[in-house]
Every structure is written in structure tokens, then in C-alpha cells.
Image (tube, grey):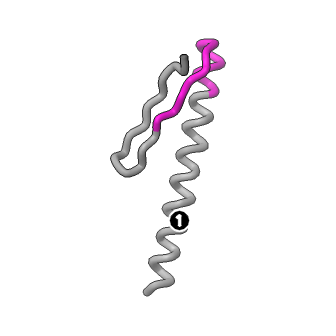
Amino acid sequence: MATDFKKTIAEAKVKGEEIEVLARILAEKMQALHGVPFRILLDHQIGFLFLTVDR
């Protein structure tokens, strides 16, 4: 049972890291399109992702 829990935690961590990578890719693409850097605000606890111009 503990092994299943550890596996679930590990899988969630990998998915969270993947989301962070995708958010960085999106910010880079927005920067390429608009010519200004973008900042990522990401909170997995509340399900929040926000990209804003980093001025």
C-alpha cells in the first residue's frame, strides 16, 4: 500500500514538472511573438497559471 502511495506521489511530481516546462515554453513563445519577456505565476494547489509581461 505504501508503495502505491509513493508511486502516485512520484507520478504527480513528474506531471507537475511537465506543466512547469510547458509554461516556460509558452512564456518563451509569447516573448518571441511580442518582443518582451513574460513571467510565469503558477500555483498547483489552487490550479492557477498566469503569464504576464515581466517589466
Q: How many marks?
A: 1
- Residue at 59% across / 13% down in the picture? 34
Magenta-colored stretch includes residue 11: no
Relative image position of residue 7 (x, y in whole percent): 52, 74
Relative image position of residue 10 (x, y in whole percent): 54, 68
- Magenta residue span: 28-41
Q: Is residue 37 above or below residue 14?
A: above
Q: Is residue 55 above or below residue 46?
A: above
Relative image position of residue 17 (x, y in whole percent): 57, 52
Amino acid type at image mark 1: Glu
- Residue at 57% across / 31% down in the picture? 26
The quarter of the rendered structure image containing the N terminus is bottom left
- Residue at 47% across / 80% down in the picture? 4
The residue positioned farthest toward the front in the image shown:
55
Q: Secondary structure at mark 1?
A: helix
Q: Which residue is mark 1?
A: 11
Relative image position of residue 13 (x, y in whole percent): 53, 60
The residue positioned farthest toward the bottom in the image shown:
1
The quarter of the rendered structure image containing the C terminus is top right
- Residue at 47% across / 35% down in the picture? 41
The residue positioned farthest toward the left in the image shown:
46
Badge 1 local density, few (<14 within 10 Å), some, or many (20+)?
few
The residue positioned farthest toward the top in the image shown:
35
